[in-house]
């Protein structure tokens, strides 16, 4: 088992992110943003990626996964799919340079007036993305978040089974369930035994617009209870990656936390998760 985190929530630049992980005693990180730019997109230059790669190598820091923008909250299902194809192609090359196997993906902002189209188009797109992943030897890790595929555990499993590719796996985010207003226990029972990667967030259960992220174990996402089952009963031995959202929510506007607040809250969150796991 590897405990790590989406490192840009600790700091904007890769060296600060590495510093935080070293302070936590972690030897791996999940790579998403460096100086506000996603490292798995075509907008992130090869020159910038080379700087990130060298920093990781010089600090003996491995990468468990890439947090891509493929299918995410910024991309509608009726938008330009070529953006996702291009991102996956360049991300796969960079992942292979780092020896990274997983790339986080979603199933696009759906057309609320035509969910059947949203479903069928998401499946069609994933079949194409899965072929690219197969050729590159990497895994698409589909997260329960934005899009038809992440609305329910049944949708997630249907996506995986219909695409029918060994290079499509599921990523279970504990906090997204509560944040979207769903029952954490019901969702977990539906997705249990079907995921290969875990994101740890904690949140109150959304009621209308009333919802907030909390430190791990302090929200309503049932994180300690679920981890106990996953680790002790199911023998999960994969990646557990924190995505705190307590000081930095990358896709929401508003006042930004200070660099010190980002760093310290990340260290606190990671330490709290370690204590929960050790307590099991």
Image (tube, grey):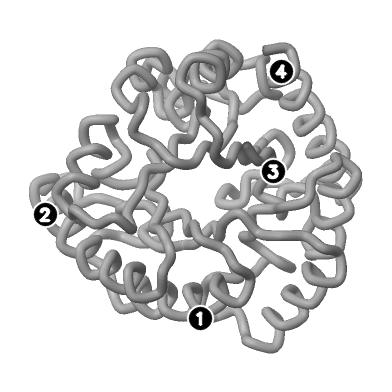
Question: From the viewer's perspective, is 109 left or right of 1?
Answer: left
Which of marks 2 and 3 precedes in the sequence? 3
Which of marks 1 and 4 precedes in the sequence? 1
Which of marks 2 and 1 precedes in the sequence? 1
Q: Which residue is mark 4?
A: 276
What is the spatial separation of the Cα atoms under label 1 and label 2, in whole angstroms? 26 Å
Residue ID at (52%, 37%): 198
Residue 185 vertical position relative to residue 54 in the rendered view, above or below: above
Q: Which mark is residue 90?
A: none
Question: From the viewer's perspective, is 215 left or right of 138?
Answer: right
Percent coordinates x, y for residue 87 in the rendering: 44, 75
139 or 205: which is nearer to us?
139
Residue ID at (46%, 26%): 209
What is the spatial separation of the Cα atoms under label 4 and label 2, in whole angstroms? 40 Å
Q: Residues within 10 Å of mark 1 (few under 14, many from 20)?
A: some
Say which element carries label 1.
Answer: loop
Q: Which mark is residue 42?
A: 1
Instruction: Locate the C terminus by quadrant.
Output: top right
Say which element carries label 4.
Answer: helix
Q: Which mark is residue 120?
A: 2
Discs 4/2, front: 4
Q: Which mark is residue 4?
A: 3
Residue ID at (50%, 73%): 91
Is residue 108 something that shows in the picture? no
Residue ID at (36%, 28%): 193
């Amino acid at each position: 088992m590897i405990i790590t985190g989406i490192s840009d929530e600790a700091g904007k630049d890769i060296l600060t992110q590495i510093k935080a992980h070293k302070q936590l005693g972690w030897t791996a990180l999940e790579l998403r943003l460096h100086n506000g730019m996603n490292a798995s997109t075509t907008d992130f230059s090869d020159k910038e990626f080379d700087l990130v790669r060298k920093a990781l190598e010089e600090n003996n820091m491995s990468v468990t996964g890439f947090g891509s923008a493929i299918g995410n909250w910024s991309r509608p299902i009726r938008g330009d799919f070529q953006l996702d194809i291009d991102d996956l192609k360049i991300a796969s090359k960079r992942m292979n340079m780092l020896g990274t196997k997983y790339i986080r993906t979603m199933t696009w902002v759906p057309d609320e007036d035509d969910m059947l189209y949203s479903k069928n188009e998401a499946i069609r797109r994933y079949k194409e993305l899965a072929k690219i992943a197969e050729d590159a030897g990497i895994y698409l890790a589909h997260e329960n978040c934005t899009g038809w595929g992440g609305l329910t555990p049944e949708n997630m499993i249907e996506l995986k089974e219909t695409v029918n590719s060994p290079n499509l796996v599921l990523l279970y985010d504990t906090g997204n369930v509560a944040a979207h207003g769903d029952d954490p226990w019901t969702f977990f029972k539906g997705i249990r035994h079907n995921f290969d990667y875990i994101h740890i967030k904690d949140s109150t259960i959304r009621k209308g617009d009333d919802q907030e992220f909390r430190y791990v174990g302090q929200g309503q996402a049932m994180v300690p209870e679920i981890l106990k089952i996953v680790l002790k009963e199911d023998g999960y031995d994969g990646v557990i990656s924190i995505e705190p959202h307590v000081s930095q929510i990358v896709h929401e506007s508003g006042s930004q936390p200070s660099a010190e607040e980002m760093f310290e809250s990340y260290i606190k969150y990671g330490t709290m998760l370690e204590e929960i796991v050790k307590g099991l």
